[in-house]
Image: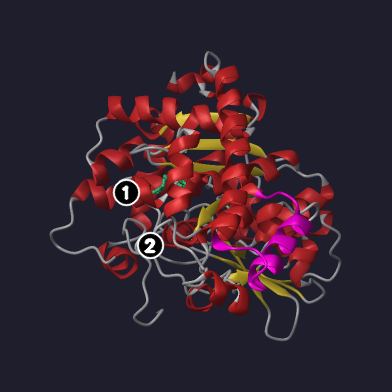
Amino acid sequence: MVGESRIDPWSSQQSTDYTRIRDNFGLSEVEISKIPNPNQLHRRGIVFAHRDFDVILDSIHRGDNFGVLTGLMPSGKMHLGHSMVIEQVKWFQDHGGDITVTVADLESLATRGVSLEEGRRIALSEYIHNYAALGLDPEKTNVYFQSMRPDVQRLGFMLGKKTNLSEFEAIYGFSGDTNLAHVQAPLIQAGDILHPQLDEYGGLRPIVVPVGVDQDPHIRLTRGLAGKTNWFNLKERKSGGLIIGLSIQDENKIQMGVSESGGVNRQVRSSIFEKLKLSLSKLGFADILANPKHGTIELPGATFGDKSRIKISLLSLEREMGGMGLMPPCSTYHRFAVGMTGDKMSSSKPETTIFMSDTIEQMSKKVKRAYSGGQATIEEHRRLGGDLSKDVAYQYLQFFFEESDSELSSIGRDYESGRLLAGEIKQICIDKASDWLTDLSEKRDQWSDRIDDFISPDSR
Ligand code: TRP
């Protein structure tokens, strides 16, 4: 259990104690030195945590296939906060990932009361249009609607067998009066996240989900559900190496060599073990200790780094035997930029953020009014300097608008030393944001009549 801390993905509140979140929920720390060609968000520590990101880095390193899944809730307008995930998706795209985009129209219906038609309109005109302008490549991107992909709904439904209301209560704080459509939304989202691995959608490969840390409850749920469907468990062995165990379930009893009476069918069991040994020796392992009676295989020589290769080979064996063979998703987490007023960014409070469609005038007005880390008077500011940790203009340069690290740190130094005044750093932010918004709007124009290129045939 995680003590009293819980993240509510639908809440308008947000904790910003990122170290605590990382520790409480067992997220791993991102090691920037392991990331090839790190982007702005990586370099500045904004992507701060992950689960199994190493598996993806390994795929990139080896040139193996991997997929990226992201999703959007079509409600309100797209703002700067939403663009952070797309920056990351673009980085994965540039490093060989195929992209699937979920339009969570069912979730929006369930949790925001947005009709499916309205959801579709918002998704295309607000979100996908901007995704195109931000640089997603239609050749490598596949957008679908939850309401139009029965495979996702079916998978979500099946995964429901592996959880119960108590778990949903613990993860999401649901209670007796929670709307049942709302209860279904996380299961559908688990279906979203896992379905790109199905044979019809690209087949078995690691899938990474870049999200804001508020979405981690869904990732945790999905990883747990995938693990519970697996026919083979892979764990660290106490005395070193790895150990594989059979996971006997109602769904796989027969294939696993367990008879109706509960006895072990030796013939079936030993043929499973022959297959297991064959796949492991193909991976190059020679020291394989099989114990068919206990249903375990030990690999004393395997290391932690072998885990994902072994996992994938076990999952493909599971698939051959008739199982789903689902790999738990990998994820990365980003911090949130502060809202312009000092609170959380929110579509429903236009003064807290910059929308992708804001005019230069609207943006300038918001930056001028934004929360500042400057001192009360010029004299004090020159003497004490500005506070970067509170200054919205600085943070927006850091998160979004200033690409150059050296330029950013020189602005930061000048501001902290009092050389640069609050009004001046705001003006720098306005100038940079103007270029950014103008560029985006030009790119949007270029994509206006080609949005359909992104939409999967089943969702047109
Ligand atoms: N729940 C997400 C949101 O609130 C939307 C979403 C649905 C999603 N399915 C997803 C996000 C899969 C990432 C992965 O915005």
What amino acid type should be assigned to the residue bearing mark 2?
Answer: Asp
- Quadrant containing the N terminus is bottom left
- Few, some or many C-alpha atoms within 10 Å of disc 2 (few <14, some 14-19, many ≥20)? some
In percent of width and height, residue 233 lies at 59, 66
Q: Which residue corresponds to mark 1?
A: 349
| Vertical comparison of 193 with 236: above or below | above
Q: Are marks 1 and 2 in contact (CB under 8 Å)?
A: yes
Furthest-front residue in view? 379
| Vertical comparison of 458 with 315: above or below | above
Q: Secondary structure at mark 1?
A: loop
- Quadrant containing the C terminus is top left
Number of labelled discs?
A: 2
Q: Which residue corresponds to mark 2?
A: 343
What amino acid type should be assigned to the residue bearing mark 1?
Answer: Lys
In front of the other: 5 or 14: 14
In percent of width and height, residue 34 lies at 79, 63
Which numbered tag is attached to residue 266?
none
Circle nearer the N terminus (1, 2): 2
In front of the other: 271 or 132: 132
Predominant secondary structure, magenta span: helix
Left/right of residue 138 with respect to residue 122 in the rendered view = right
Q: Is residue 116 magenta?
A: no
Q: Residue at x 43, y 25 (%)?
A: 125
